[in-house]
Image: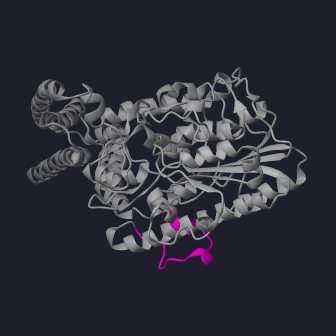
Amino acid sequence: MCNKHCSDNAATTEKQLRNTALLACYFYIAQLVPNMGLAYTEAYSVWAKLSLLLLPLGFFMLWNAATKRSGVMIIAAFPLTFLCAFQIVLLYLFGGSIIATDMFTNVLTTNPGEATELLGNIYPAVIFVCVLYLPMLWWAGREWYFHREISLPFRKKNAAIGGVAMGLGLLSLIPAYAVSENKRVVREEIFPTNVIYNLGLSISEYNKTRNFDETSRDFTYHATRNGETPEKEIYVYVIGEASRAMNWQLLGYPRETNPRLSKTEGVVMFSNMLTQSNTTHKSVPMILSSVATDEHEELYRRKGLPALFNEAGFETWFISNQSPQGAMIDNLAHDAMHVEYMGNPRFDCQMIECMKKHIENSSAKKMLFVLHSYGSHFSYHQRYPREFAHFTPDDDVAISAQHIDILRNAYDNSIRYTDHFLAETIAYLGSLKGVASALLYCADHGEDLLDDARHRFLHASPTTTAYQLWVASLAWFSKDYEAFYPQKVATAREHAAVDATSHSLFHTMADIASISSPYVKENVALTNEAFDHTLPRRYLNDHNHAVPFIKTGLKAEDLEFFKQHGISVGE
């Protein structure tokens, strides 16, 4: 009886040890899935790819050897598992690249409604991540609960193999650094160390944002006016959302997406406008600020456009159709004297009614309205009333190549609604008697719409595309304004096709309103004769470095697209 009982116990123990060993192997494979994906998608050197695979494998095997219980080992590594899951979803969404600094910031600043819309349309990646990691975590929790230990022979074997893998991975770094251009292999090419670095940078940026009131408290533009009309002045600064230039009829798109603006007098399209960033939380603050891409740290010291106009004697409003995000956008918005956020449904024309109310109830002779629109933010079919569903079908569908026509229909409908919103705003301003007014519009970034074989979608990816960079931008001037400032209007028309970036917007708006300041640069204002055509265009990358657009991850498809549209992105 004792022999049978002892035999059963031995068999049970052997089975438990085998299961514990299988769990450890499951853990290694699951943690290396994003590394294998990156080794396939990224243009790293063969040595960097070896390190990308061997260093994490060695680390996890040594991590296993250092603990007696695999359940404890796996649960303790949950933060790394979370990063793995995040990376897999990112690979599905963008087809490559690591989790960027901006992606962490997006998690902190995206409102829950937007996040829900996105997750609902990338469910294959979410399901895959759940199937891969939830059973492992459940199994690890069970092993932890029953205090099951890893056998000593298995731990020794793991230590030996892990040590060899780690050693080979470290040796591979030597030639990897030798062939690397930037000499930042571990920081930029080895997952998850690169992502941990980016997380630290994101936290640093978040803290700077939180301290903005303190760091900008003593800032002043020393603003003055170099011209003033005897009439009432109203200037409207419209910040668009995810509106790529290639889908605008006014810029050559074959579909009728601008039926009203194409018939509106006084509109000047800036046909060669590139965004400084493909992320909202970076691009919008720079559109609201005087800082250039090569002086990013100044963003946390200087106040924004409303503060400039306040100093020049204007009454200022910031009206947003987006929710407060806890980002730099909100800091710069609150420089305005009045701040108002729209409620649901979030259709942009609501902001016109809000603006009308304030104009009719105010006695101010000089007024600035900053309108932050929802534009073409995904999910596209929710950005316009149903009567604007011109291109159909436009249903809410999963992100996939088979649904590209439906997705494009919905996106184009959102552009038509932006056309209607801008045309209505212009029509209202034009109807005001004895008022000199002007409107300046620019989208914060563009959007990928499964445009080519890469099947890229959305924006804010760590590497850019032509579709994310080329954005819609325009100006409009009332007849009264043009009568007082004919040269500014004529200069804007002369500069309609010049190379520009969204950095020009702040300075152009200041020039339109004849505001001078040591921080307002005439040589980047599109309405100023001093505009400098030779200035290089720069992009603010994920690590907040100003780089040429050609260095933002553009591929052959993007360069060909730019060439076809006559857009130069430098060398």
- Whether the magenta-drawn stretch holds residue 384 is answered as yes
Residue 304 appearing in the image: yes
Image quarter of the N terminus? bottom left
Residue at (74%, 36%) from the top-left corner?
Answer: 309
Residue at (43%, 35%) from the top-left corner?
Answer: 538
Q: Position of residue 107 (x, y in %)?
A: 49, 45
Q: Position of residue 16 (x, y in %)?
A: 19, 49
Colour pattern: one colour
Q: Position of residue 247 (x, y in %)?
A: 46, 63
**Left or right of 27 on screen, residue 86:** right
Residue 138 appearing in the image: no
The magenta span reads 379-398
Residue at (20%, 42%) from the top-left corner?
Answer: 43
- Indicate the quadrant where residue 260 lies: bottom right
**Left or right of 190 on screen, residue 570:** right
Secondary structure character of the magenta stretch overall: loop
- Indicate the quadrant where residue 548 lies: top left
| Outermost residue to the top | 218
Residue at (61%, 41%) from the top-left corner?
Answer: 527
- For the residue pair 310 and 455, the one nearer the viewer reads as 310
- Indicate the quadrant where residue 225 lies: top right
Image quarter of the C terminus? top left
**Left or right of 202 on screen, residue 88:** left
